[in-house]
Amino acid sequence: MTDDGTAAAAATSTLGYEQARDELI
């Protein structure tokens, strides 16, 4: 629980990636 900011950033980038992939398909 030390890298809360990193975890949040990773989750956000993953979410954005999933959304972008849905747009392409």
Image: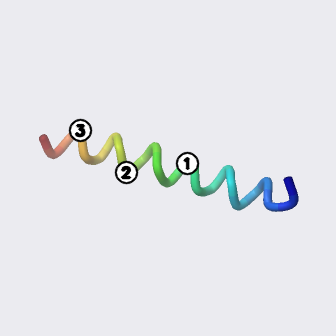
* Earlier-in-chain disc, 2 versus 3: 2
Q: Which mark is residue 12?
A: 1
Amino acid on which the number 1 mark rests in the picture: Thr
Residue 7 rendering spot, x and y as whole percentages? 68, 54
Q: Residue furthest left?
A: 25
Circle 3: residue type: Asp
Q: Residue at x 50, y 54 (%)?
A: 13
**Crowding near pointer 3: few (<14 within 10 Å), some, many (20+)?**
few
Q: What whole-number distance in Å separates the C-alpha atoms at marks 2 and 3?
A: 9 Å
Three-letter code, disc 2: Tyr
Q: Quadrant of the C terminus?
A: top left
First in sequence, mark 3 or 1: give its number.
1
Classify residue 2 by image quadrant.
bottom right
Residue 23 drawn above or below residue 10: above
Q: Residue at x 21, y 40 (%)?
A: 23
- Mark 1 Cα within 10 Å, few/some/many (few <14, many 20+)? few
Q: Secondary structure at mark 3?
A: helix
Q: Secondary structure at mark 1?
A: helix
Rendering coords of residue 24 (x, y %):
15, 46
Residue holding disc 3: 22
Identify residue for label 2. 17
